[in-house]
Image (spheres, rainbow, N blue to C red):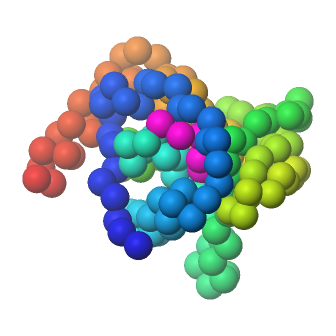
Amino acid sequence: MAILPIVRVPDPLLKKISKPVNKVDDKLRSFMDDMLETMYDAPGIGLAAVQVGKLLRILVIDTSRGEEDPNPNFYINPEITWTSKDINIYNEGCLSVPEQYADIERPAECKVKFLDYSGDLQEIHATNLLATCIQHEMDHLNGIVFIDYLSKLKRGMYVRKVKKYTMEED
Ligand code: ZN
């Protein structure tokens, strides 16, 4: 496994639409293992393939916390088939927008259809943090980052902070 570099705003790659995966094979699984290792190393609870430079419709998510056993799940070609009318507000962050957080409103629950790590079709009903995380990561596949929901002024401020953070890190 390998830790991959994470793409940050304002990289134009993050605005691109990711393409569906044609085949779930060992080569793809090896890339997904790298995604998982990269996410754990960051650390984060969700990562989309575009965030490590590949425009493929793949997410990895693990919302287990603290003492809980790790519970990584891969979502290949995910599609949201239903969202609740109830809304949740969550203070979201993103590995492509390090150290920045904002309250974002999303449907509190959703159903999502996807292929799993083995290439089998699954459908789950997600609630709470998992529902938020799936919707946040799905946005990445469509070229949307959570700061795109903020005002232009606020978004610009966040991008400047990330640029500064990246410069200081180098
Ligand atoms: Zn993100």
Residue 44 in view, yes or no:
no
Image quadrant occupied by the N terminus: bottom left
Q: Position of residue 26 (x, y in %)?
A: 57, 64
> Which residue appears at 59% of the width and 47% of the height?
58
Residue 57 colored in magenta in the image:
yes
> Which residue appears at 47% of the width and 36% of the height?
55
Looking at the magenta stretch, what is its main secondary structure?
loop
| Up/down of 157 relative to 48, above or below | above
Q: Nearer the viewer, residue 110 or 128?
A: 110
> Which residue appears at 45% of the width and 69% of the height?
37
| Up/down of 66 relative to 4, above or below | below
Question: In which image quadrant can residue 19 be found?
Answer: top right
Q: Position of residue 59 (x, y in %)?
A: 60, 50
Q: Is residue 155 left or right of residue 57?
A: left
Residue extent of the magenta highlight = 55-59
> Which residue appears at 36% of the width and 16% of the height?
153
Q: Position of residue 11 (x, y in %)?
A: 30, 31
Residue 37 in view, yes or no:
yes
Q: Nearer the viewer, residue 60 or 1?
A: 1
| Up/down of 148 relative to 125, above or below | above
Q: Nearer the viewer, residue 101 or 36?
A: 36
Residue 11 colored in magenta in the image:
no
Question: In which image quadrant can residue 136 be found?
Answer: top right
Q: Position of residue 27 (x, y in %)?
A: 51, 60
Q: Is residue 126 left or right of residue 106?
A: right
